[in-house]
Image (cartoon, rainbow, N blue to C red):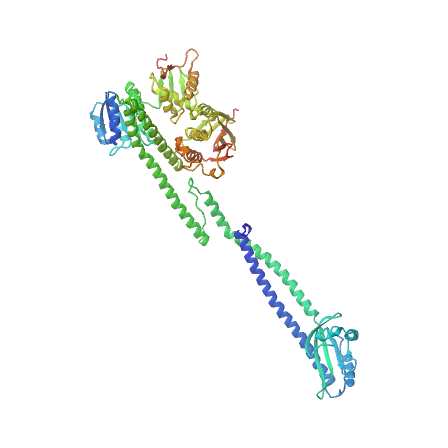
Amino acid sequence: MRILVVEDERPIAEFIQRGLEAEGYSVSCAYDGEDGLAKAKSGDYALIVLDVLLPRVSGLEVVSAIRERDKGLPVIMLTALAETDDVVTGLDLGANDYLTKPFAFAELLARIRAHLRQPGQANPTSLEVGRISLDFRTRDVSRAGHGVKLTAREFELLAYLMRHPDQVLSRAQILNAVWGYDYDPGTNVLEVYIGYLRRKLAAADRDAPIQTVRSAGYRLVSADA
Amino acid sequence: MPSFLSGIRVRLVLAISAVTMATVGASFFALHETTAANLRGRIDRELHEQYAEFQQRVLAGGAVRDPAALARASSRFLAAQRYQPEARIYVISPHGLAPVTNQQRVIAEELAEARSGRGEQGEAAGGGIVAAADGLSTVSTDETGKLRVLTEPVLVGGTRVGTFRAADPLTSVDQALATLRNRFIAVGIGALLLSIAIAIWLANLISRPLRRMASVASAVDAGDLSHRIDYGGDDEVGVLAEAFNHMLDRLERGFEREREFVSDASHELRSPLTVLRGRIEQLADRVGGGEAVRAEAGELMREVRRMERLTEDMLTLAKAERGGLLQPRRVPLDDFVEDLRRDLPLLGERRYTVESSVHGDLRADPDRLAQVLRNLVTNAVRHTSPDGRIDVSISSANGRAVFAVRDDGTGIEPDQLGRIFDRFHRTDEGRGRAEGGSGLGLAIARAIVEAHGGSISAESTPGHGATIRFSIPGYEPDPGR
């Protein structure tokens, strides 16, 4: 699997390259937008990791140029801006996902894995796993066509689980991603939320597709027929 | 200066009143003296005229040669007065004979008094008409009050045969002066009242723009420097207003530059932090590194996280103060409270209660609102013991949602209350650092609340906990409940 990393800050490009290579990917680096676009056009890459702020040609321009040629190539944007506007623009131009610097490398890896597994799913405004669908814009959630009313936090938790279907996610991973701030490791807040989520998602005839994996974490099962 | 004298109004009133009173007083004194002198001068002239008439009628022609002839001639003169001026007293005293007078009773009494011996101390000093010395003098009698007396010797061939005295009462002068005084008192009071009114009006005229300036100045703070004084005049106050506005312009630019710097700096810090974090993660995962390396990496990672949090907080604060941080939408408060209730234990094990009397929507940024409460509760956790309690309550007032976080911890000293929302402010140096707070939590809370158009405040009894309360406008109660 070949991955292209377009990032003007060499130390960042370097550690991403090293980390991905350690995971068995083959990685090329480009240090500005022009070079990145040229490499993306010529090479045969399975995924592109793209910084937004790039010299010469901006990351946003690179995204739209790539999209014109290849509708299916997953693009994950890296942004130090965390400015919603840029993120929204990037997603609208066709990027599949974004990460805000500084990010946990494990998170980047997880997203790369998810996008490589389902290269077709290029619409991050809604998610669908099994019979559960979730819309980021309207914040509607339904299971098997029946609307489910979730609180904001429950919605974030479900969205996170749905981004990583069938994957076992550790408590620490989930707490980090959904709550994001310093938490008390001994807290049972995740258990409480999983409990609520299960209750709300449970249909008349079957349980919610959230599995507890003993001493490992939780998993959202996509085979929810 | 005592406070009641310090107002511009009071000072102006006092100054103008003092000047008015001094002017009125000086005018009164001058007019009083002039009038008194004029009136006395007229009386003196009349007395002299009277003497001239007496000389012409009695002495001219040489008929009077001895005191007896003087007495007879004087009696004729007095009887011949065309009118009997009640007020004027004539006394002609021929030597060795009883005085001839038109006021027999008064003079008889005077003479009796003089004989009874009281004259020893009083008469010669001008106590009576008959004792008056030659020339003009002023005497005072019990019967007639103050009198002006002209005393002239009656000479015949160089020999004094008697004394002519004419006296006019000074009561008319006193009355005129008393009238003058009364008028001046009336005019003085009027002038005083008028000057006070003018002073107040003037003081208002001067102080109104100053007061407006003061209210603008107190409305200005780091969060909102957009206020300007709108004063069109080009007088001294206008100059001051313009200088003030210029100062605000400069301050605003300064604050803007500072915010940009903070924003840029924390932004720039993210790249090296990304590298640090990535490298440390890889270090921990490296095969053969052993447990010691892993522990060291974990230690480093904790510090990196702290720096990440700090840069994140600085960026959030800069954005909240500059605007553009919030993405407000309709927040169903029931759901919000439910999440809040479940999330609280994340911030540290305490006895929590969450009470809400609101059921409706609040127009706010839910993530930022949650951040405010998180920061307040984190702050409360930091200042309470592990068995402490933290109460969160949500109520509504005047279309605002009011949130309060109360703890039973150490509380806040009164002199710290106003400063706890300052950046990097620590009530207890060292304590915050040890527990890894960025020192920006409450500053961010305030910035977010103010970005929502709300307000935040703290109250505390030291030793008995603290309450931080904030309100956010835009609450709409659920009509269904």
Residue B345, image x, y percentages: 44, 24
Residue B200, image x, y percentages: 55, 53
Residue B379, image x, y percentages: 44, 31
Quarter where residue A216 is shown:
top left
Image-based side of B338 in relation to B74, left or right: left
Quarter where residue B121 is shown:
bottom right
Looking at the rendered structure, the number of numbered marks drawn on it comes to 0
| Residue A212 visible, this orientation | yes
- Residue B90 in the image: above or below residue A76: below
Residue B90, image x, y percentages: 74, 77
| Residue A67 visible, this orientation | no
- Residue B475 in the image: above or below residue A217: below
Image-based side of B15 in relation to A36, left or right: right
Image-based side of B350 in relation to A42, left or right: right
- Residue farthest toward the front in the current orientation of the protein: B292
Of B172 and B282, nearer the camera is B282
Of B445 and B326, nearer the camera is B445
- Residue B432 in the image: above or below residue B27: above
- Residue farthest toward the left in the current orientation of the protein: A42
Of A138 and A107, nearer the camera is A107
